[in-house]
Image: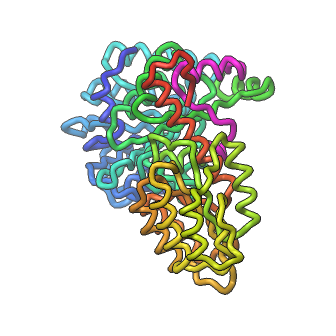
Amino acid sequence: MAIDLHRMDAFFRPSSIAVVGAGERPTSSGGAVLRNLRLCGWGGRVIPVNPKGGVIQGLPAVTSLREISPPADLVAVLVRPEAILDVAREAAATGHRNLLILPGGFSEAGEVGRARDAELRTLAADQDLLIGGPNCGGLVNVLDANARFAATFFRDVPAGGPVALISQSGAIAEEMIAASHRDGIPLGAIVSVGNAMHLDLADYVEYLGADPKCGAILLYVESFGEADRFREVAARVSRRKPIIALVGGRTLAGRDAAFRHTGSLAMTADATDAFCADAGVHRVATLRELRLAGKVFGTHPRGIGRRVLVLSNSGGPGVLAADAVMQAGLEMIDLPSDLAATLRGMLPPEAAVANPMDLLADAREDRFGPVLAAMLDGLRGRVDAVLMIHVVPFMVDAAPVVTALAAAGASAEVPVLHTMMGTLEGRAEWFAKLESAGVPAFGDAEEMCAAAGMLSRRRQWLADLSSGSPDVVAV
């Protein structure tokens, strides 16, 4: 069905929400939704709905939707499956038009579920109801730090930032929320698609593609729904912001598992590759790669060029990074002779003045900072990104180094990515300082290089698109 994107505002930025099935216990689904609305600091009107009425989690409750006037922008439905149709009928009768149904028990649930699904579809069509779900984990929108919303029973909300995840798996969504805090992924929206009775993958991609607060879209999918429509929508959106997909079912065993999970018939690996290429979608192979994509595309959605410089204070990680750079399709540039001479005058004689650069283990801020500045100045127009590695030995205070590199990265004319390795007692603080300066921080140099490779492929795809290349493929 054709969806009015403006109507989807009721799901992402409502001014009021009724929670049908609200409960006091935060471990119940209805209680968890109330908890998360409070946890995210949402400032809209929350109306718990429970036949017992009273006060639930400090909020006055009503016994039915009939007591709510004017109707809520969104109704979150968290009752047992056999009661959902009654809630939908009451919603239709009382002017509540937008329903987010989290429980299952529909097309995925045998003959009884399919009958319930058909009846709900008929009611929705007759009464102009718009349904998200059913059988989903809900929706979180904290893309805008000043308008945080979370209608979900997930255990936490993401860290916030310009990256959105649309997922056909609640467990993958939960993991990405955890990773947003653990790994510094700037994740600001989570959409659990569920059965997609009305709002499907393409609708969410189109909506988030039009949201200026969203800079990149991650997908976990097992099927693309209406494939032709998804391809058309994604091809348009991917020109403005990257879409990165982890597609489950790359093997026969995986496709069988996807069918048991969602009832979807997954494409073969080759067919999926071709489909993603047509849609302008970059396909990643693992959840690890999806996390990496979320980290770097949140900062650099337009990607980077291929020419990179590796600046390290340790030989071994520099060697591994050089290998990883080449494997990622990047280019290790040579240092011009005049710049190399300048750097030799700044460094101890044991330092390796080359690419990768080895500043030696005892490098502090008075070595890292000036060398980085000299290299950025001397390579202006000849390097597309700097990949830094800082191994922290026992005799060096890392905090001043981090402060200097964060300041340099924030003002650099090219993207700077940074890896910190070793025993990092201040890891969370140091990574946060770097990332707040626009410098994605990693605990592994090879992951940093792989992420830079993703960014480079995005930039090349955009360049091919701009030139009208007939061979343009996915990012």
| In the foreground, 184 or 417 | 417
| In the rendered image, the vertical position of residue 42 relative to residue 230, given as above or below | below
Image quadrant where residue 75 sits: top left
Measured from the top left, where is residue 224 in percent x and y? 56, 22
Q: Is residue 142 left or right of residue 318?
A: left
Q: Is residue 90 visible?
A: yes
The image shows a total of numbered marks equal to: 0
At x 50%, y 47%, the residue is: 153
Residue 161 highlighted magenta (yes or no): no
At x 66%, y 43%, the residue is: 287
Image quadrant where residue 126 sits: top left
Measured from the top left, where is residue 205 in percent x and y? 44, 29
Q: Is residue 276 left or right of residue 445?
A: left
**Is the N terminus in the top left, top right, bottom left or bottom right quadrant?**
top left
Q: Is residue 290 left or right of residue 205?
A: right
| In the rendered image, the vertical position of residue 419 relative to residue 322, given as above or below | below
Measured from the top left, where is residue 216 in percent x and y? 45, 40
At x 57%, y 42%, the residue is: 306
In the image, farthest residue toward the left: 70
**Is the C terminus in the top left, top right, bottom left or bottom right quadrant?**
top right
Q: Which residues are magenta?
A: 266-289
| In the rendered image, the vertical position of residue 109 relative to residue 55, given as above or below | above
Residue 279 highlighted magenta (yes or no): yes
Measured from the top left, where is residue 421 in percent x and y? 67, 68
In the image, farthest residue toward the right: 253
At x 61%, y 76%, the residue is: 347
